[in-house]
Image: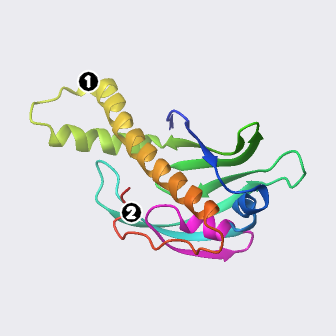
């Protein structure tokens, strides 16, 4: 298992607190905003999600996976939600939090990804096979760092696009989740 750096994004919100709380009250709509998602179905305390995903070193694919809400306290001082995926490209845990400050509301998003050893090895081998120059097998550590950097950059782009969609959704009351582009690219 290879843990990628945490992706953290904070965005100011123009909406008021009651409008921003739909972040926690409509998890299915929130999941539909994730780039590439074309289906979200509630299923026994979790959500079954279908997403078209394009990642470096792999062909575009459609993934069917589950999202579990792990924590979502509803007290007045703390409003956040933590959810995790089962069966996605890699292990993914996400935190959504609202923060009220002197300058208004802020939307805080953080995601943590853990890439399995088999996925990392597959990506390293793909990268080695596509390079123009010959790669020695003892260069695996360098290739692994390059591969994880490419994958992390793609995840950052997906998460930024996701946060922008969520921010627009929260600031436009009554608007439905936008239709997603079929490629899943940001």
Answer left or right for 6 relative to 26: left
Q: In the rendering, at what x and y percent does residue 149 appear?
A: 37, 34
Q: In the rendering, at what x and y percent does residue 118 appear?
A: 41, 44
- Find out whether residue 11 is within the magenta segment: no
Answer left or right for 114 relative to 14: left
Residue found at x 36% / y 58%: 185
Q: Nearer the viewer, residue 110 or 90?
A: 110
> Which residue is labeled 1 in the image?
139
Q: Nearer the viewer, residue 109 or 138?
A: 109
Q: In the rendering, at what x and y percent does residue 128 appear?
A: 20, 37
> Which residue is labeled 2 in the image?
184
Q: Nearer the viewer, residue 80 or 40?
A: 80
Answer left or right for 102 relative to 178: right
Q: Is residue 47 above or below residue 122?
A: below
Residue found at x 36% / y 71%: 182
Q: Is residue 62 above or below residue 185?
A: below
Q: What's the CA distance linking mark 1 and mark 2?
A: 32 Å
The earlier-in-sequence mark between 1 and 2 is 1
Asked if residue 179 can be seen in this view, the reply is yes
Answer left or right for 64 relative to 93: left
Quarter of the view holding residue 117 = top left
Asked if residue 66 can be seen in this view, the reply is no
Q: Tag 2, which secondary structure?
A: loop
The quarter in which the C terminus is drawn is bottom left
Dot label at residue 11 = none
Q: Tag 1, which secondary structure?
A: helix
Which residues lie in the magenta part?
A: 27-45
């Amino acid at each position: 298992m290879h843990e990628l750096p945490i992706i953290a994004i904070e965005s100011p919100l123009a909406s008021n607190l009651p409008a921003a709380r739909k972040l926690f009250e409509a998890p299915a709509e929130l999941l539909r905003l994730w780039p590439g998602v074309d289906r979200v179905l509630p299923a026994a305390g979790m959500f079954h999600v279908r997403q078209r995903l394009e990642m470096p070193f792999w062909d575009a694919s459609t993934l069917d996976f589950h999202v579990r809400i792990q924590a979502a306290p509803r007290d007045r001082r703390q409003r956040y939600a933590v959810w995790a995926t089962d069966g996605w490209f890699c292990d993914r845990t996400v935190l959504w939090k609202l923060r009220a400050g002197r300058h208004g509301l802020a939307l805080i998003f953080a995601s943590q990804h853990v890439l399995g050893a088999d996925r990392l090895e597959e990506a390293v081998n793909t990268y080695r096979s596509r390079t123009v120059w010959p790669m020695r097998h003892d260069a695996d550590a360098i290739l692994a760092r390059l591969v994880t950097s490419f994958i992390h950059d793609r995840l950052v782009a997906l998460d930024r696009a996701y946060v922008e969609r969520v921010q627009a959704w929260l600031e436009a009351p009554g608007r439905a989740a936008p239709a997603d582009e079929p490629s899943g690219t940001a």
